[in-house]
Amino acid sequence: MRLIKFLLAFVFAWALIFVPAQVSAETTTVILVRHGQTAYNLQSRYQGFLDIPLNENGLEQAKLLAKSLKDYPIDVFISSPLSRAYVTTETVAKMHGMEIAYTDDRLKEINFGDFAGLTPEEGMEKFPKETKLWAESPSLLTFPNGENLRDLQYRGRAALEDAVAKYPGKTIFIGAHSRLNTTIICSMLGIDLEHFWQVPQSNTCVNVLKYKDGVWTVEIMNSVAHLGKLIM
């Protein structure tokens, strides 16, 4: 009887030590992508919450992205509800014979408020102080009737963390936007948002992020190799 009790105690202790370690060692991969090109991108207009569709080049970029990832196993697709991100994500998902699992409003681009639809020149004319601040100290600006980078970073990171909690150990494709992606990457690298402009995101760029034991690592950032270019 004592031997049986000893063996049971040993097995229980082994489970406490080793089973959680196996679970915590699970790695979750996030493929974070920016949408393809739009007409507003070509004109450098502030898009934000405006639902601007992909242009012909953007659609072609999405197809090239899909082809480059067709042999890479992806378990789930998540997207911003804005069509430029949704169509980009959907194009990749279809290549895998899959559909988008869900959209998340928290993955939308930054809310540019009164700047939405303006070119940089129009922004400077209507909001000279704010435009100058956006160029020189972006982390300090809250767009009139819009939001700021810290608000964006908070909601984007929350959306990412929820996805990882929902699909642990899986590979997750997330289709989103440049400003949102940049703030997420800054948070993972411990970079203050005053350096926001030093973390670029090109159209359909690929970022590969990995999560393990409560720690995020950035494996690939702003890759556009699928477009036949090293950088844009």
Image (cartoon, rainbow, N blue to C red):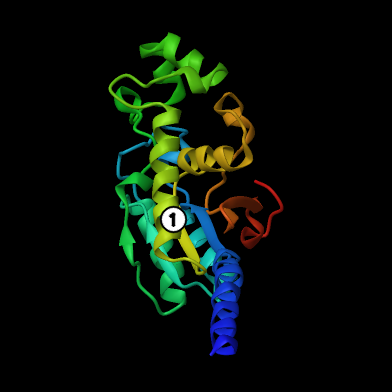
Residue at the farthest right position: 230
Whether residue 54 appears in this view of the structure is: no
Residue at the farthest left position: 145
Q: Can you give x and y, in whole percent of width and height, for residue 69 in the image?
A: 56, 70
Q: Amino acid at mark 1?
A: Gly
Q: Is residue 118 left or right of residue 185?
A: left
Query: At x 46% / y 73%, what residue is drawn?
Result: 75
| Label 1 sits on residue | 175
- Few, some or many C-alpha atoms within 10 Å of disc 1 (few <14, some 14-19, many ≥20)? many
Whether residue 118 appears in this view of the structure is: yes
Q: Secondary structure at mark 1?
A: strand
Q: Quadrant of residue 177?
A: top left
Q: Nearer the viewer, residue 164 or 171?
A: 164
Q: Quadrant of residue 197?
A: top right
Is residue 167 positioned above or below 32 on the image? below
Query: At x 63% / y 40%, what residue is drawn?
Result: 189
